[in-house]
Image (tube, coloured by chain):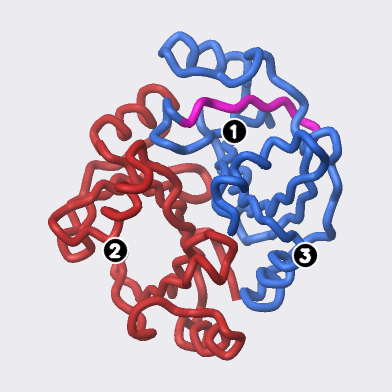
Chain colours: A blue, B red
Amino acid sequence: MLGRVNHIAIAVPDLAMATASYRDTLGAKVSQAQALPEHGVTVVFVELENTKVELLEPLGEASPIAAFLEKNPAGGMHHICYEVNDILAARDQLSASGARVLGSGEPKIGAHGKPVLFLHPKDFFGTLIELEQV
Amino acid sequence: MLGRVNHIAIAVPDLAMATASYRDTLGAKVSQAQALPEHGVTVVFVELENTKVELLEPLGEASPIAAFLEKNPAGGMHHICYEVNDILAARDQLSASGARVLGSGEPKIGAHGKPVLFLHPKDFFGTLIELEQV
């Protein structure tokens, strides 16, 4: 089921500082910041050779990463996104095995314009998993 | 400085259960478990198309992931490992920029038999970063 690691998401309290750190201190290639109000985040992509890291800062009142940053004020690794070929087939297979899909269970259009689902971290040893259809 | 994402490490309290979950529920290719007593962990590699996830379970009395699992009993994302070409040059550049290298500052031989260093998560927004020379 799992294909490539599409990205590793890191929630940060200050996106400008984090971007400067990855660019200047770690010497990575970083994108411009992109506000995604419909997803409640502003994102910067850190482009690595084989995948990317996404630095996420809360945007707006109902950001999905606000609670995480309340618990982890310095920031931290938030989720891993894996690519799948058929997100509905993946969802049905996961549900049949007892894994919980967050929300309504219907894929939403994610930050890259593709269908995504999130899996309950309690079913995967504390790791929040995003599936993205590619 | 940063090259490929070599792996994402996830600490888990029960490696057999986590391995079964990634293999059977998520449909990923997993390795046999490897005990690495000199590193205080038993590891299973989850092979993705472009990188790998390492599932880590504490081994022995002084495991480096024991404190993390005390704080996060269900498990969770523990660190990201990036490849670098020259770990001593990377260390010197990072130290000059004020980033803290954990331990003595001298690279140790990591779980893959290559020199590694860890960077202080407080200097990188709550993310523990491992650098591995390749």
SS category of the residue bearing label 3: helix
Q: Quick check: A114 left or right of B19?
A: right
Judge depth for marks 1 and 2 and give the one in front: 1
> Residue A16: which disc?
3
Judge depth for marks 3 and 1 and give the one in front: 3
Q: Quadrant of residue B73?
A: top left
Residue type at mark 2: give it.
Ala
Residue count near mark 3 (Cα–Cα under 10 Å), binned few <14, some 14–19, many ≥20: few
Given the image, what chain letter belongs to the residue carrying mark 3?
A: A
Given the image, what chain letter belongs to the residue carrying mark 1?
A: A
Q: Quadrant of the C terminus of chain A?
A: top right
| Residue contact at pointers 1 and 2, CB within 8 angstroms | no
Q: Which residue is mark 1?
A: A130
In this rendering, is residue B109 above or below B4?
A: below
Residue range highlighted in magenta: A112-121
Q: Which residue is mark 2?
A: B111
Are the residues under marks 3 and 1 on the same chain?
A: yes
Judge depth for marks 2 and 3 and give the one in front: 3
Residue type at mark 1: give it.
Glu
Residue visible at 23% across and 54% down? Answer: B41
Q: Quick check: A82 left or right of A28?
A: left
In this rendering, is residue B130 above or below A116?
A: below
Given the image, what chain letter belongs to the residue carrying mark 2?
A: B
User: Could you tell which of marks 3 and 1 lies nearer the N-terminus?
Assistant: 3
Pick whichever, A89 or A32, lies toward us.
Answer: A32
Q: Quick check: B66 left or right of A113?
A: left
